[in-house]
Amino acid sequence: MEQSQLDDCVDATELEKMLLQNNSRPIVLIKRKPACRLPQNLAPGINRLGVMLPSSPLQYLLCRYFRKPLVATSGNISGEPIITDNKDATKRLANLCDAFLHHDRAIVRPADDPVISYNNSSPQILRTGRGSTPTEYRLPVTLDTPVLAVGGHIKNTIALAWRDRMVISAHNGDLGSLRSQQTFKQAINDLQQLYQVTAEHIICDAHPGYGSTQWAGESGLTVSKVFHHHAHASSLAVEYRHDKSWLVFAWDGVGMGVDGSLWGGETFFGRPGNWQRVASLNTFALPGGDKTSRGAWRVAASLCWQADVDYVVPASNAVDSLKLQQLKMIWQRKMNCPESSAAGRLFSAAAALVGLVQNETYEGHGPMLLEALAETTQAEAIILPMILDGNNVLRIDWKPLIMMLSDTTLPVAFRARCVHETLAECISRIAVQYSEQHNDLLIGLSGGVFQNQLLVQLVRQRLHTQDLDVVIPSSIPVNDGGLCAGQIIEYYFQ
Amino acid sequence: MTDLITLAHGNGGKHMRRLIEDIFARHLANELLNINRDAILLPEQNAQLMTTVDGFTVQPIIFPGGNIGSLCVHGTVNDLAVSGAVPKFLTLGAIIEEGLSFDVLNKVVKSLAQTANQCGVHIVCGDTKVVPHGQGSELYFTTTGIGYKSAVVDYSTRLIQPGDKILVSGSIGDHGAAIMLAREQFGLSGDLQSDSASVIPFCQSIYNLKEIRFMRDPTRGGIASVLHEINQATGIGIQINEASVPIRNEVTTICEMLGYEPYYLANEGRVVAVVDANVAEHVLATWKNLPNGHQACIIGEMTEQHQEVVLQTALGGERIVHQLSDDPLPRIC
């Protein structure tokens, strides 16, 4: 939209307005105005809109003559990179659109629009992209040989690092798709060519099934593996100190843990290269494996059954009783039911339990609806029990949360808020405890869960009352797009 | 009560003799089988011999659409058939766990005999062992197959070219899904049956075509594993059109619920063939006319566009089909 239309739609702060005008013309997530006249089915249930000012001459012309905000989506098939060839677009997007407006200038290097949000007045990059990539960073250390970190499997980005320099590629997408994998390989070649640096060593995630890990194995170069959540934790050391003790909360969906199980709600004490897992969520089953990434109801049911509560699907026809019965059988017999401590899945389950969504249609769908709803009310935190397990890991017991979420006598928004307050309280209690034991401790948040602005704000408020500060990646994506940077730091210190 | 197999049935004495005579020899009798000899002479034939061996450990041993007896015939004759040989003889090794009921063994061996008959093969020799309770899983069979080469082509992945078409003779994943259902009482109503069957008619119907490159029966690991095997051997990309792969609704439902993909589920009565594009339609028509062949389809082709095994989805997306790993862990963060 044009700048003059902003105030009709969103409540942009001065900082957000400035960011919108940045040369890279990013998409900025801004609070939607209640009176906004854009259709309600635009980002339904979410109280922010991704807003962008025109960036190319063509977009300027379109906006000038249309004179109203335009709703845009990227020219791709779900999970794949944007299509850059006119012929390809005409063929592959024919079912999705009525007309094509082509440009006669070829696209050599595809790049998505960058996505940024403000988190407590500091910008937070959610997706790298056009106008800002390859992004260069000064490393806090000096490498002997050039290395390439190939990142994760979804929201893939890669990083090339040599001496004290590191460059991060644009967003390559989900490596399960052929085209993303082609873009990923092109990015690997492009970065090395552009900077005239040839990587001599590869760093990848420890998950054997990731497309990036498989590429690393076939690269012919020596490979180091970095565990997913160690990389999330170490990504903080690009922007903040690496030589002090940290307490990092690495919360996201699932990633391969050191013990071979699926981690995702971890707390580490230590520093890059030497992370000690000190706290984690009690594990729960993910019936159907990857199906749980869009099937919030599966996780909700699994958590309920583990807590000895019935899962009553809230007024919704998305899940029938036969399906629930079948899921229970799978859960009881542990068929494709990997155990996980993933905090991201807990948020999804909460969204299902309060009836917001059973089958999510995009990543983070449930947690985003839950966050939006939670912003509308207040609630007190529940104090979750934490018990040291045999490996000296403090285990957070989420069962009281499930009891609260299943209590239909409580208003839905109250329950949504209570989840946020409870988990923020849980984080802050662990942080306070460690800060009392360790002077000068840095407290960090990393991983996709902390795209949740309310959660971050509640943690920050609690810690501020204790005179503690908390940091979060800002110029490096807090989600899996930041893994490659963390992989490089973690590799150096290992 | 002599209803159960005991260790005495494996000790070489009279109990064992009875077991062999009353069950194995009775059902499997044919002009070549002689239980009193250690080895037998096979009839001379003016053709090249092909041989293969396979072990069978399926659980449960009786499942919707078949049992371990029918399976141990189909599995081995199918290996010969896809290699271009008409199966003629089988040898049978049986390892029985103490405590198996005579009735069950009788039923399974009877079915084995009927299946062999239908496939036109003779069981020419056999061996029986009984293992103590707890050291086996009811019943294991091993069959060796011998056949005469009959195809005009020496099928090999080396013959495969870009542009070749890939066919499958029927719906995929039925066996794997049926076994899961039988094992787990999934509560899925429906009549899903294993596809356990001989593929001899499908293979034999195209032995005369010199344009056939390669055939394989996609058993364990499903069609995904066969496609990966072809991809790795040839280095040529494979493009599969998701919409054209025949999959039964029941199989889709169970996979959807469990988070499995039908491409990785076992089949016991299907053939995947790679053929010259010029004969693809002809092969398809031939197969469709065979009993059980109505679901045969051209599912994709060998391509130079990329070097992966790629599934083109109904929405036009192109998804990489990964190789089956030992322990498929969720990847989505």
Image (spheres, coloured by chain):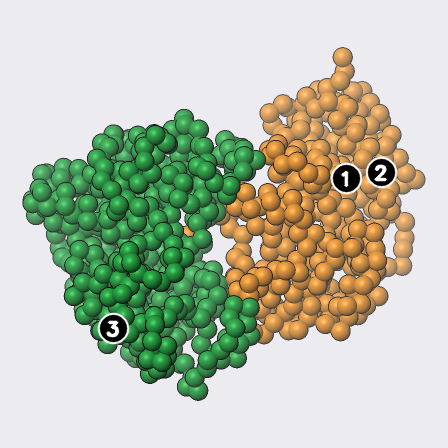
Task: Say whether residue A9 is visible.
Answer: yes
Q: Residues within 10 Å of mark 2 (few under 14, many from 20)?
A: some
The chain to which mark 1 is attached is B
- Which numbered disc covers residue B70? 1
The chain to which mark 3 is attached is A
Please name the amino acid that badge 3 sits on.
Ser
Check contact, mark 1 vs mark 3: CB within 8 A.
no
Q: Which chain is assigned orange?
A: B
Identify the image quadrant of residue A9.
bottom left
Circle 3 is placed at which residue position?
A: A4
Please name the amino acid that badge 1 sits on.
Ser
Q: Which chain is assigned green?
A: A
Check contact, mark 2 vs mark 1: CB within 8 A.
yes
User: Between residues A336 and A421, which one lies in front from this camera angle?
Assistant: A421
Same chain check for tags 3 and 2: no
Circle 2 is placed at which residue position?
A: B114
